[in-house]
Image (cartoon, rainbow, N blue to C red):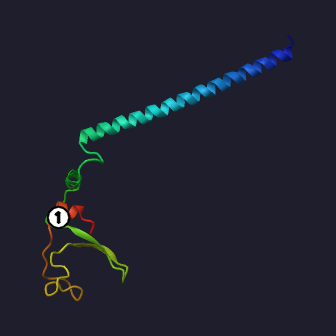
Amino acid sequence: MDERYQVLKAIADSEAEIAHLEQASARALFVLKELHFKLAMIEKAASVTATGFSKYSPTAAKVQLFADLFRGRDDIFARYWFSQKSGKKGYSPVCEYEWQPGVCTKPEKKCTAYKYVPLTHVALRSAD
C-alpha cells in the first residue's frame, strides 16, 4: 500500500471513531438528563412527604399552612383597594360597618365608629 492510501484510511478511521464517540456522548447526556429528572422527582416527593402537603392537599389544609407560615395579628386584617376615579390604591383595615348608612361616615369624613373584622380562614380564602 502506498502512503496516501494509509493516510486516507487513518483519516476515515479517526472520523468514524469521532462519530462513534459523539453518539456515545449524546446517549450519556440523555441518560444524565433522565437521572437528574428522576432525582428531582424523588426530592420533590420527599419534600411533600416531609411537609405532608402537595397541590392535591385539601384547601382547608393549605389555608391552615398559609396562616401558620404568615402568622401575624388575627384581631384585624387589611384589604386591598383601588380607586378607578383617582387611581389611588392601598390597604385599609376591614371594618364591619364599612359603607353602612347611618353608621359609616365615608367618604365625607374619616370613620369614628369602627369595628374591625378579625382574621379568619374564611377571610384568608376570600378573593375580595
- Seen from the viewer's position, the closer of residues 31 and 75 is 31
Q: What's the residue at 34%, 39% (across, down)?
A: 44
- Seen from the viewer's position, the closer of residues 41 and 113 is 41
The spot of residue 4 in percent (x, y) is 85, 17
The spot of residue 10 in percent (x, y) is 76, 18
59 left or right of 19 in image? left
Name the residue that disc number 1 marks: 119
- Which image quarter: residue 100? bottom left
- From this view, report whether residue 118 is shown above or below residue 35: below
12 left or right of 73 in image? right
Split into 4 quadrants, where in the image is the C terminus? bottom left
74 left or right of 54 in image? left
Furthest residue in direction bottom, as rendered? 108
Q: Amino acid at mark 1?
A: Leu
* Disc 1 packing (10 Å; few <14; some 14–19; many ≥20): some
- Which image quarter: residue 37? top left
- Seen from the viewer's position, the closer of residues 56 and 6 is 56
The spot of residue 59 in percent (x, y) is 23, 53
Q: What's the residue at 49%, 29% (across, down)?
A: 31
- From this view, report whether residue 127 is shown above or below residue 19: below
Q: What's the residue at 85%, 14% (across, down)?
A: 3
- From this view, report whether residue 117 is shown above or below residue 99: above
Query: The residue tagged with tag 1: helix, strand or loop?
Result: loop
The spot of residue 28 in percent (x, y) is 53, 28
- From this view, report whether residue 50 is shown above or below residue 110: above
